[in-house]
Amino acid sequence: MLLLPFAGCSLFEDCYPLNIKSWSATKKSGGTLNLISEVDSSMKLKFLVIPAIVIPVAVGVIPFLIGLIFSFTDWNLTVPGVHFIGIQNYIEILRDSSFWEAVLVTIEFTGLAVGIEMLLGSFVAFLLSRNVRGQWFFRSIILIPLTVAPVLSALMWKLMLAPTGGVINYLLGFLGMPNVAWLSNPSTSLLSLVVIDVYINTPFVALLVFAGIQSLPLEPYEAAQVDGASGWFVFKSLTLPMLKPILILALVFRLILSLKTFDIIYATTRGGPAALTTNLHLWSYINSFQYGAIGYSMTGAAILFIMIFALSMWLIKVWSRSVSYMTSSQ
Amino acid sequence: MYMQKREELHKVWIYFGLVATAILVLFPMLWTVSLSFKVPQDITCAVPKFIFKPTLDNYRHLFSIAKLSKSVGTTSLNFPRYFLNSLIISGFGTLLSLLVGVPAGYALTRGKFKKSSTRENIAFTLLSFWFGPEMAILLPLYKLYRTFGLMDSYIGLILLYQLIGVPFVVWMSRSYFLDIPVSIEDASLLDGYTRWQTFWRIDFPLVKPGIAATAVLTFIFEWNNFVFALVVGGRHTMPVTTGALGFISYEAVLWGQMAGAIVISALPEIILAIIVQKYMIRGLTFGAVRG
């Protein structure tokens, strides 16, 4: 797919001696031969990209860099004066138990939610890929949670999980379960959030994996059938390796985005009860907007950023390795 | 015969799974819709009512500001305003994202850079804005916006929403432009058309459906945003996402009206999504799936 833009070049190399001067010019400069682009305005075309860089830099990169500087100061709204204190915030944060609790919540939440989403999403994708009638209908229904704002979905669940009059307690009552205040009970609050996240994001995994299954080649399966391979063997040594790139891709997206979950937690528990559902992202928000500890909260945000950055670098490497394995084995 | 029977049985299980999934997906929405037509006594009674006398009170309250502010006491909620704000911010935000993003997407497909990998790198770097934690930029931005008087302003929010819109539009439009073979364009250039004419003659008709779907998704993503409006939005620019939280106040939780607000806020998204359904999947998976 990435080779498409170069598809035209080789055609024109031989058959179009448009302009001898530019021909020799490109030859000398040793660049790839693209006569047409040489004579028109492709060189100027690249400037169109400038606005798309300037705006995100202005509202994204610059504030981020300023924030990094904040993280090296003792700026606190409740204390007058701002001083540079070097890496003291970073040392202090590593000794702060509330920080480590937030890290733990982040990891627990992400691990549980993404794990369930990957399994459930793959299962739904498998169901969708069986060519049954009405597949189109089911696919469009499964799309819906992806388009509704996460906050609104979270609020819907808040309505359903309410201790009095909540429909979830009512339905579970038939199974003999006692009434539970799902979002404010310390032992169920994080789990409830995981359920909400699973509701919102499983469709994403399902869609990706479904498309992956649709694009599997038929020949290996026919060969396996001829050889009389068992269903489990076919799954383990054909389907799974071939789906690996798309599974990793889904994992990359889900891991990164759920590490920085904010909306659904803020809308339902606001980090409570106590700080049992405060993940690192919310921890950073609470520290700055409730406690006014600006420098310290930016330290937390910077650490979250580094966590996400390192993880995505590593995952992208794993992904590209799995892709190159695919293309070389074909 | 045996095999056929097994196949049939298999199909029953698959249908069972699909129907169960559909119910799980739809139930929270339908339940919210039902709540929005209930009177308060029906909402908080211990045994949820599946059959009840529907009322339009919640919706009437939502759209009559005077009554609403009276019923909540100190907090004044203005849902029509929130809705209008969402329309303005996401509407103009999407427009700006398209104006900035589509030409950039084109430049990153056809433009000549020193190294051809630069195009890919810029596009990818832009996309990575989606993955950064918002808090890392929002607090400094809060300070900056206060300095420049952009707090609680449409312009401030629309600019900030470009962090969602621009990377997405660039990424998606580039993916659509990449589908067009260079040779068609080159042929048109050889015929003496300029780059600009070629764009409108050749590329634009081909990418139009894709860009339209991208526009709809950009609108939805910007509509869905919560964190940005929470920090730099305010009384005047509050969109539906932060506005819906206002129904939980210290005095009481207005469940019925909140349900109504959720329904009205989510409805445009669901309708839009169904309209462009055919092109949605590619956008929702960031171009990873072509369908």
Image (cartoon, grey):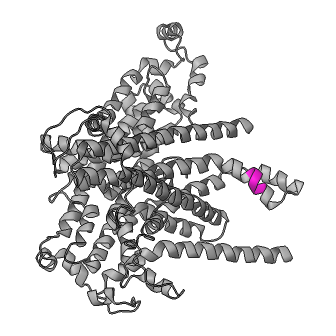
A141 relative position to B11: left or right: left
Give, as a single range, the part of the protein colored magenta: A234-238
Kindly identify the residue that appears in the image at 19 percent across and 77 percent down: B251
Residue A189 lies, in percent from the top left, at 42, 69
Q: In this image, B95 relative to A156: left or right?
A: left
Residue B61 visible in the snapshot:
yes
A235 in the magenta segment: yes
In the depicted structure, whether residue B165 falls above or below residue A186: above
User: Residue A106, how many percent across, how many down?
Assistant: 44, 54
Of B40 and A66, nearer the camera is A66
Residue at left offset 35%, top offset 59%: A263
Residue A91: x %, y % from top left: 36, 38
The answer, for residue B215, to whether it is visible in the render is no
Q: Nearer the viewer, residue B183 or B284?
A: B284
Q: Position of residue A80 (x, y in %)?
A: 12, 42
Residue furthest to the front in view is A95
Residue at the location (14% across, 58% down)?
Answer: B236
Taking the image as shown, residue B23 lies to the left or right of residue A127, namely left
- Residue B1 lies in what quarter of the image? bottom right
Q: Main secondary structure of the magenta part?
A: helix
Asked if residue A319 is positioned above or below residue B271 in the image, the reply reads: above
Whether the magenta-drawn stretch holds residue B250 is answered as: no
